[in-house]
Amino acid sequence: MKLKTLFLFTALLATTLLFAQEKYSLKGTVFTSDTEPLPGATVVVFGTSQAVSTDVDGNFAIEVTGTETLQITYLGQQTVVIILKGERQLSITMKDSSTDIDEVVVVGYGTQKKSSITGSVSKLENENLDEVTSSRVDKSLQGRIAGLQIQNITSEVGEAPQIRIRGLGSISASSNPLVVVDGFPIENGLEYINPSTIESIEVLKDASSTAIYGSRGANGVILVTTKEGSVAKTTYEFKSFFGVKQAYDDLDLLSTNQYTDMLRNERQLNENYIAGVEGRSPLAIDYTTREKGMREVARQSGEIDWQKEGQRNPATIKNYQLNVSGGKEGTTYFVSGQYIQDQGLLKDNFLDRINFQSRIKTKLSDKLTLDVNIRPSYSKRRRSSVSFTDFARTYGFLPVRHTEYTSALTGYPVGSYAHGRHFNNLTFDYVDEFGVQQNYTASLWGTNNNNPMSRLESDQRYQHDYRVLSNYALDWRITKNLRFRTSGGVNMDYSNYERFRSSEAEFTGQAIAEDNSTMQTRLLTENTLTYTYKKGDHDLEALGGITYQKTNFKYIGIYGTQFPSDYISTINAANLIDAQQTFTRKEQDNLLSFLGRINYAYKNRYLLSIAARADGSSVFGPENKYGFFPSVSAGWNVSEEDFWKNNVQFMNRFKVRTSFGVTGNNNIPNYSFTNLLYSNNYSLGGGAGSVTSGLGETGTVLGNPAISWEQTYEYDTGTDLGFFGNKLNVTVDYYYSVTDKLLLQQNVSYITGHNQFFNNIGKIQNKGIEAEISGNLKFGALTWKPSFNIAANQNKLVSLGGEAQFISQGERSEEYIARVGEQAIQFYGYKMTGVWQTAEELANNPHSSDDAVGGIRVADMNGDGIITADDRSTLGSPFPDSTWGFY
């Protein structure tokens, strides 16, 4: 009997256990903190790939056994974790992530809680960043971060904008910030990133934040963190964008008749108003033969609006993005692809780009985690052969292609390109007022002027860019408090530029071609050891590491001319290879660095951070290779004090912080510390220099073995405020920085055979204030996340190595000046005060020998009574005094 009872009990127990392991449908509803249903929240059975999403009413159903752990996530909400105990119905309320949570911010070589950061760091999460219709991420950042200035310097698509953080810190050396993507420094890194793959962007602005990057962080650092997969079911995300763009406005140009009328009126004024002659009768000034010819061609062939001829109206941009992510059992993946078609405003300018990314993160064991990232990309770009100003300067009488009239006039075939040089020494027939057949000869334009449409259509400039960025990171959790991280990667860039200008477009009548290729390989390895210690009210983190970077660069350029046909455009068909313009170049540079940082916090109230980095660079000579860049910063979380918590309810975050640090800059050409030679033509027997005269070696760089690091000393103080549970956040910073030992090109005597050489001279000062205001406001079902930022910067050139000023020229011969005591770079030229109205006015006021009635009147700045080059003055700066943004 006892045996039967025991058997029955065992059978019942086994049945109970069996039923306990059977799955059932767990139902639930997810709400916001305002009790609104939350659609699209992800519910995951932790540790498995089993996941569901809530419907439009916030409801979900998932198969469970009743003992699992659920994880509920949603963007902008705090993650909720629930350990099941047999429940069959759940009601889950999620809290907004802006309240009662300490945000994690990516910093150099790690992460920190926002409350413990003592430097100036701005964070931008990817909320609709990928919906901005731009082919580049950096242009999408315009106006989003205080102190980050992004300025377009060309209208060509695909071209990098100019990026500055807190003003201009250098003149000759590069002022571009360092871009770090997933811990890997990348040159032009923002160009090849699909915006939809970005998780967040942090901008490190002060020296205490950037000193850990040493010389590479002198101009600020932009940290990009890309998305990872999650342990859930595979998700697919596809986005497509289409946009149009057009020129904001065209220049209001004169027609041919208006232009020739203007020329005639100028002469009429000069003839009728001569100083010292009174009562002179007005003269009937006729058009010159050149002006008559222009008017006749325009009358016969029509007027051309060259600006509209060269433009697309509108140009389009298309952007396609596909992301696939998922994972299971300790391995996650994120795969992304992007295709962009971007048309420029000029008809010959376009960009096609393909970006791809594959990121796999896996736990090799409980202590080892491997993160592998591969980013190949390809772009094809047709670069514009003309500019907008080329069209604005072209006379309206000139047709794009020869008409029957201009063909008969010039002798060039109908339909061929009409060039300015075709309209020289032409004979025009006309019938005078007496009915007599007359003619005159005129030259309407210069001999070397090209038709801009011929260059746009027949000057083909294609650039192909191939890039592969692959990197890995291996994390080893040695103990609970000790972690070792080794990472490395290779960044390979290959760029090929091909140009062919047909004989129709070239004013010499000979086609020209060039083929240039650059190959750059950058290898990087970084090894860091991090120790964390927490006991009671004390938090300590210590970081030490060593990094090594090696860059190889190679350039090959070939230039040829005298092609037998415009249909054969490859270099091997050229009858003449220009030996002087055909050359190769190879360079290599190395950077060895040692770094360290200590962060300490007491009760999360009193904060201290000390960091330092030593960089050794091959850019400098043997005696000056190494530079040392330390920083120190401190902070006080006032809102963590009891007196604040007990008395101030509306402001939950109040932190003050201050920092001081030193960073360096070595962004000058390689081998500037030594003399360099290059091949050049020379003359024999008094003949003109040519290939037949021979090639010789001449100096190209005068080396300076004493040059060393450009150094920036920066002080920053700021405060971080959070109101109403961080629903409203305010950050304010004041900074003051001085860049000393500027790496500048210093003039040298001509007897050396050189014009300039690099030297450490000069000093620049920047100071300014920044403010960022952001909110996470909810009004019932409506959520509004406004963000406003404003920044003001004052830049001053303190010294210039004993010189008072330095004048340089830009691409189109415009002048810039660097003058001690003023902004480091300013426009330079004559200040216009009006137009000369009469000859009497001209005679009785300061003027130059070239001035005439109807011409521009400029100011006599030095008051000597005449207008000379000494009357040039500063005309403003290319850098704004303040910037702001709202989104």
Image: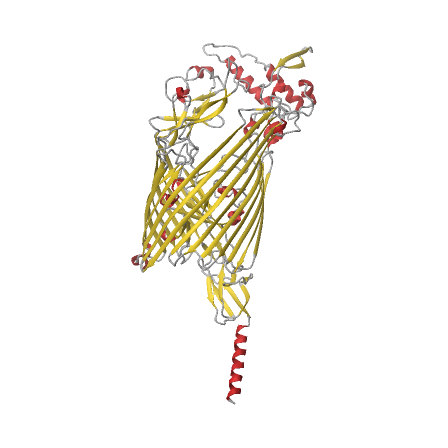
Vertical placement of 517 versus 449: above or below?
Answer: below
Residue 251 visible: no
Color scheme of the displayed model: secondary structure
In the rendered picture of this protein, how many numbered marks are placed on residues? 0
**Nearest the eye: 617 or 882:** 617
Query: Residue 595: which quarter of the image?
Result: top left
**Nearest the eye: 179 or 248:** 179
Q: Residue furthest bottom?
A: 1
Q: Residue at x 64, y 19 (%)?
A: 296
Rendered location of residue 843, percent (x, y): 43, 14
Q: Residue furthest left?
A: 643
Rendered location of residue 295, percent (x, y): 62, 20
**Nearest the eye: 126 or 884:** 126
Rendered location of residue 726, percent (x, y): 40, 55
Rendered location of residue 306, percent (x, y): 60, 28
Residue 714 visible: yes
Query: Residue 418: which quarter of the image?
Result: top right
